[in-house]
Amino acid sequence: MKDELLQFCWDYVNEKMENLQKRNHALQESLNSETKSSAGDKHETGRAMVQLEQEKLGKQLFEFGEIKRVLQKVDIKKESTKIALGSLVKTTSANYFIAISAGEFKNEGMSIFCISAGSPISKVLLGKETKGVFTFNGKQNDILEVV
């Protein structure tokens, strides 16, 4: 199950990065194909807006590069009774895979939320063990299993 979760996270990151790279490439083509027109200021404003959009995309690509580095550190083979990066945590409220924030993974009627180690719920869970208790958003929950 953890290998499927890790693959789900990798697919999420790769898809997002691919989409960002396609958008960046399209913007670059737009910038390259624009020729100096008689519009003057309008032309320059258009170029500036495209360049600003490229900068935003560059920042997003950098952030996803950082997320990939976190994923590379996830060791799903490591067995531990304590919740850490790469843990699959089953609780009375929900199931979590501590890796990156990639949304909900569904398999055979089971729902697992892929969350980053920096998320509020992860901060509460990290270091706890099976049969432990935690409080999140004012509600007490039990840790049923750590895989």
Image: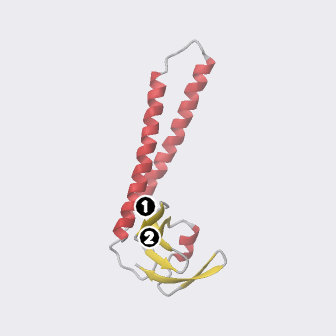
Q: Is residue 18 above or below residue 26?
A: below
Task: Kindly give the residue lying farthest to the front in the view shown.
Answer: 109
- The residue lying toward the viewer, choosing from 102 and 58, is 102
What secondary structure is found at the residue carrying circle 1? Answer: helix
- Contact, mark 2 vs mark 1 (Cβ under 8 Å): yes
| Amino acid type of the residue tagged 1 in the rendering | Val
Task: Kindly give the residue lying farthest to the top in the view shown.
Answer: 38
> Residue sitting at 45 percent across and 82 percent down?
145
> Residue sitting at 45 percent across and 49 percent down?
16
User: Which color scheme did the rendering employ for the protein?
Assistant: secondary structure
Residue 84, quarter of picture: bottom left
- Could you tell me residue 17's position as x and y percent? 43, 47
Task: Answer with left or right where residue 107 lies relative to residue 56.
Answer: left
- Could you tell me residue 36's position as x and y percent? 52, 15
> Residue sitting at 52 percent across and 74 percent down?
94
| Amino acid type of the residue tagged 2 in the rendering | Leu
Residue 50, quarter of picture: top right
In the picture, the quarter occupied by the N terminus is bottom left
- Could you tell me residue 70's position as x and y percent? 43, 61
Q: Which residue is mark 1?
A: 70
Q: Which residue is mark 2?
A: 85
Q: Is residue 70 above or below residue 90?
A: above
- Could you tell me residue 140's position as x and y percent? 61, 82
